[in-house]
Image: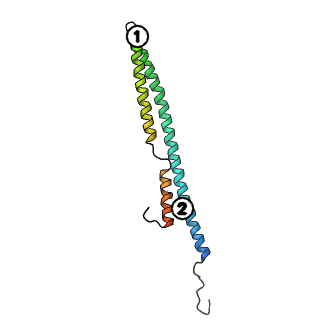
């Protein structure tokens, strides 16, 4: 014990404050990295699902269209084979153009990759600058 009544605990110094600040920054970076990894995993799972179901749909759709065209050609072979072939070709062309239009529209409307991570990083920067209006 001290004879002069001094307290042995000193107030936190600059080193302790810097250590706590560094720990806070590292924790913040870890949270943001976890969010980034989670978003990347979600995008990967979504892409794998889309590719799998797209391949199944393409395969089954192609077989269906080929069998339908074959059936129509067999039914009209004797009387109107050229008309049947022309109508089938025209129908396939219309469906092809509609599918391309739909695909283009869906690709343009897709969500931005890593939008949540980027939003959180922007709010972090705003908070560090002292901008409370952007939070």
Q: Position of residue 82 (x, y in %)?
A: 41, 11
Query: Which comes sooner in the sequence, label 1 or label 2?
Result: 2
Residue 61 found in image quarter: top left
Q: Residue furthest top?
A: 78
Residue 129 in the image: above or below residue 68: below
Residue that label 2 marks: 28
Residue 82 in the image: above or below residue 117: above
Instruction: Indicate the colouring scheme.
Output: rainbow
Q: Nearer the viewer, mark 1 or mark 2?
A: 1
Residue that label 1 marks: 81
Q: Position of residue 89 (x, y in %)?
A: 42, 19
Q: Quadrant of the C terminus?
A: bottom left
Q: So how many labels did they put on this image?
A: 2
Decide: few, some or many residues near mark 1? Use Cα within 10 Å; few <14, some 14-19, many ≥20. Answer: some
Q: Residue furthest bottom?
A: 4
Q: Position of residue 53 (x, y in %)?
A: 47, 34
Q: Quadrant of the N terminus?
A: bottom right
> Which residue lies at the image location 42% right of the left edge and 14% below the top edge?
85
Decide: few, some or many residues near mark 2? Use Cα within 10 Å; few <14, some 14-19, many ≥20. Answer: some
For mark 2, give the secondary structure. Answer: helix
Pick whichever, 129 or 76, lies toward us: 129
């Amino acid at each position: 014990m001290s004879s002069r009544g001094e307290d042995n605990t000193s107030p936190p110094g600059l080193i302790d404050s810097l250590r706590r600040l560094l720990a806070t920054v590292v924790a913040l970076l870890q949270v943001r990295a976890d969010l980034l990894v989670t978003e990347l995993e979600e995008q990967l799972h979504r892409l794998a699902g889309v590719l799998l179901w797209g391949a199944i749909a393409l395969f089954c759709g192609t077989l269906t269209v080929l069998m339908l065209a074959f059936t129509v050609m067999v039914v009209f072979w004797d009387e109107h084979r050229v008309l049947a072939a022309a109508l089938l070709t025209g129908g396939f062309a219309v469906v092809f153009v509609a599918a391309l239009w739909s695909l283009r529209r869906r690709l343009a409307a897709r969500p931005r990759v890593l939008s949540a991570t980027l939003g959180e990083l922007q709010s972090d920067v705003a908070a560090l600058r002292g901008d409370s209006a952007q939070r």
